[in-house]
Image: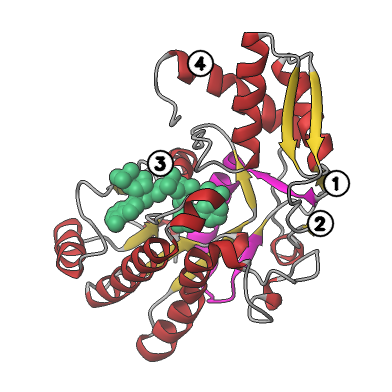
Amino acid sequence: MRETEIRRLLITGARGFLAQHIRPRLRAAFPGATLIPVGRAEADLRDPAQARRLLAEAAPDTVVHLAALSGGILDNRERPADYLYDNLAINTHVFEECRRAGVKKLLTLMGGCSYPAAARSPIAETEMWNGYPQPESAGYSMAKRMLLVQSWAYRRQHGFNSVVLIPGNVYGENDNFNLRQSHVIPAMIRKFVEAAERGDEEVVFWGTGRPTRDFVYAGDVGALIPWFLANYDSSEPVNLSTGFPVSIRELAETVARLTGYAGRIRWDPTQPDGQMIKIFDPGRLRALGLSCPTPLEEGLRRTIAWFRAARARGEVRL
Ligand SMILES: NC(=O)c1ccc[n+]([C@@H]2O[C@H](COP(=O)([O-])OP(=O)(O)OC[C@H]3O[C@@H](n4cnc5c(N)ncnc54)[C@H](OP(=O)(O)O)[C@@H]3O)[C@@H](O)[C@H]2O)c1
């Protein structure tokens, strides 16, 4: 799809975390296009009638679909049926109504947690169907896995053009800092900032700190989306990741230093570590001549600065 063909661009989930990084990039990359950002208030996409009405009213040629019920491990554990139902329903209605409305291209995202729990790192896209995902978040992860089948099936039967990208462990400004719902980086930032303010002598984390992960800055994800809209027309998913491993212990020490926390960090080895290594293979991304270039420390600095400023304004999800 050429840039000039993108005239009306609908963005679902437009008030969420990643949308704040993607929207400015879309505006800059497609200055001639009308952006139509919508959230749940405009249309609850679990309801097919609301999805159909939204597509009819917005009449987009292109859709960046970010709406999802997404959350941290604690919430996933307690509400697996909600995560399964909402995401299956949302994605089912978005694909079908976009196809019916004659949308030319749909781009959407799934998470690295959809990969099999036992996948060997670095995890390549071809690993997706080689096992069951981590059971605690299987409702969410399996619903999101279906995006790959939807993308293939709608392309095969209807010639409907869709792209599914897989950002790994994303972090950045506007993330969710609610400790029940948050991922590891926002949780660490919040704990260290608050501990530093209170003058706490110790912060405790679960596990040994030995597991390794790779983290991708949300700004890098945002920067890649226009390229995939304009240049990539395939249902083969692509990991958006750095492939650069960092141990949780190293991460904690870096966040502590950047937040000015001077106390002790204690690891509680009686609590589970989770998977020891989970790194996403950026080989396919690199083969396209692309990368996620922001160094972890730089991304963390920006996120911490944003957290402090936005919290003072009362604009953080806490
Ligand atoms: N964050 C990550 O680490 C990560 C990693 C890989 C992939 N992804 C995927 O990237 C996409 C965006 O993630 P995010 O982190 O930006 O999530 P987010 O902050 O939770 O935003 C998702 C948005 O979806 C909207 N939504 C939820 N239920 C809806 C419904 N029934 N109907 C219409 N809209 C609904 C919400 O809108 P309202 O605010 O209006 O309620 C929310 O703002 C999701 O598909 C997610 O699975 C995220």
> Which residue corresponds to mark 2?
276
The earlier-in-sequence mark between 2 and 3 is 3
Seen at 48% across and 60% down, the residue is 229
Is 231 in front, or is 128?
128
The earlier-in-sequence mark between 1 and 3 is 3
Distance (Cα) linking label 1 and label 2 = 7 Å
Q: Give the number of the mark in front: 4 or 3.
A: 4
Q: Give the number of the mark in front: 1 or 4.
A: 1
Asked if disc 1 and disc 3 are in contact, CB closer than 8 Å, the reply is no
Mark 4: C-beta under 8 Å from nearest atom of ligand 1: no
Mark 3: amino acid: Arg
Q: Over which residues does the magenta segment extend?
A: 212-239
Q: Measured along the vertical axis of the image, is residue 117 above or below residue 39?
A: below
Distance (Cα) linking label 4 and label 2 = 34 Å
* Dot 1 crowding, Cα within 10 Å, few <14, some 14–19, many 20+: some
The earlier-in-sequence mark between 4 and 3 is 3
* Residue 78 at x, y percent in the picture: 46, 56
